[in-house]
Image: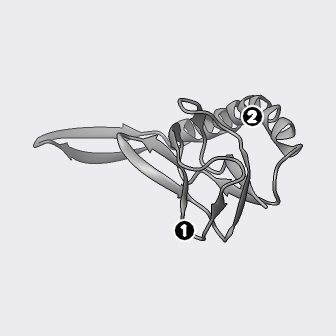
Amino acid sequence: MKNYTITVNGSVYDVTVEEGASTGAPAAAPKAAPKAAPKAAPAAPAAAGGAGSVKIEAGAAGKVFKIEKNVGDSVKKGDAVVIIEAMKMEIPVVAPQDGVVASIDKAVGDACNAGEVLATLK
């Protein structure tokens, strides 16, 4: 056990932390992640039919706020394809290279995780 003194907004708190307690929490988190992964898996095969080889992935977890490009649109490297909203901020997800939008894998309002494919280019 370790003792710490923490100050939050001017209030001082003495906190005791057990080292063994934190070991149990991360073990539970990975068990939750595989349960979420199968939910995302059905969307990937559906998109793979017309998907391009270049993936455009979310940089942060959030929800799709706006779709800037449509399937068939030409894009240049750095063009915003999808805009996600995370923590009240609008974050553009940009094309990593020049190409043509092959698929848009999410709709406005859909939740997304960091690293999840939002669109593809060919």
- Give the Cα distance between marks 2 and 1: 26 Å
- Residue 34: image quadrant is top right
Observer-nearest of 27 and 101: 101
Look at the picture and state if 120 lies above or below 106.
Answer: below
Q: Secondary structure at mark 2?
A: helix
Type of amino acid at the residue the image marks with label 1: Gly
Mark 2 belongs to which amino acid?
A: Ala
From this view, report whether residue 50 is shown above or below residue 96: above
Q: Is residue 58 left or right of residue 30?
A: left
Q: Which residue is mark 1?
A: 78
The residue located at (31%, 39%) in the rendering is: 15
> Looking at the image, what colour scheme do you see?
one colour
Bin the neighbour count of mark 2 within 10 Å (Cα to Cα): few under 14, some 14-19, many 20 and up: some
Label annotation for residue 40: 2
| Vertical relation: 37 (above or below) 101 | above
Observer-nearest residue: 111 or 19?
Answer: 111
